[in-house]
Image (cartoon, helix red, strand yellow):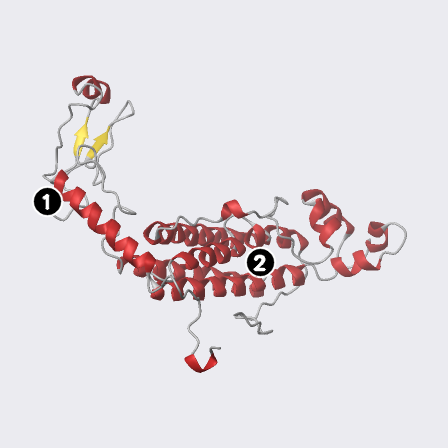
Amino acid sequence: MFQHIKDLQFDARVSQPDPRFANLLLEQFGGGNGELKAAMQYFVQAFGCRQPYPDKYDLLMDIATEEFSHLEIVGATITMLLDGVSAELKGAAEGNLVAQMGARDIKKETVISQAMDNPHFLLESQGGPMVTDSRAIPWNGTFVNANGDLTVDLRSNIAAESRAKIVYESLLKFTDDPYVQDTLRFLMTREIAHFQQFHAALETIEPNFPPAVLQGDVRFTHAYFNMSHGEDARGPWNKGKGPWEKGEQWEYIEDPVEQVEATVGQAEKVPEGNARDPEALKKLEKELAATRKKEAKGTATADRRQWSNFSAENET
């Protein structure tokens, strides 16, 4: 269940109205990397892992709920940044609004410019955030990444927190309001914390690579194809030991065209750089599949399926 506490997690404040920055801040309200996206993504992911990973269910629900709190902070900040503009819009019962506002704190040039930048924001909202990004593109469910495999979802979440962090970092460049900067720094810092939490959670799942159950074809797991002409770049992603624990090596394929022809379109390619047993990998796949099935089945039985575990005295 959810309960709403009227106090914000971080006390959002603004020094003065700023309609232009309010428009930019919509990016973190209804944008593809914003707080609503994060909240819904973690919320949706949590359902599928309640039985197999109850501890991760708790993590995802906690962070999802915090993201809704952050959405509230962003919405409150946007509303305060529009203070004055919304009052004028609602108070203009007749006549030319911008003519009435000419000499007031919110200059008519600001309102006209804001209306041209994002007409829906002022013409439809009139003082509060809309569920859009800064270009008035509506939020939609395609922003949510939930693949049903926790190792995949946690990696998606690490990426989501990284993108949200860089958006807040960019937003900080467009406001000189110290109160708004404090709020943005709080929100940006929480993205860093969530990044670390998701990373730590991923490390508790073994094995977690490759994602899901099926293992890679040993002929290609260590191969690097040099697909570009010009000076070649070499590093730990295509040279030497790489990330493996057993001293395995990258196979650098200098000329992919020649290699494809020599292997008859990979049909005759032999594994290089590793000595992994394909049969052992197939056995591992079966073991992982059985484990995942057992985890997903959990404690549910055919005659009793319920989400919450209320005490026996409350049952009828």
Alpha-carbon distance for marks 2 and 1?
A: 52 Å
Q: Is residue 69 left or right of residue 289?
A: right
Q: Is residue 182 above or below residue 233?
A: below
> Residue 304 at what x, y percent from top left?
40, 66
User: Which residue carries the number 2 mark?
Assistant: 176
> Residue 214 at what x, y percent from top left?
25, 43
User: Which residue occupies 21% across, 37% down?
Assistant: 221
The earlier-in-sequence mark between 2 and 1 is: 2
User: Which quadrant of the view contains residue 51?
Assistant: bottom left
Amino acid type at circle 1 is Gly
User: Which one is in front, 234 or 56?
Assistant: 56
Amino acid type at circle 2 is Asp
Determine whether the residue tagged by mark 1 lies in a helix, strand or loop: loop
User: Which residue occupies 87% across, 49% down?
Assistant: 96
User: Which residue occupies 61% across, 60% down?
Assistant: 75
User: Which residue occupies 62% across, 53% down?
Assistant: 21
Determine whether the residue tagged by mark 2 lies in a helix, strand or loop: loop
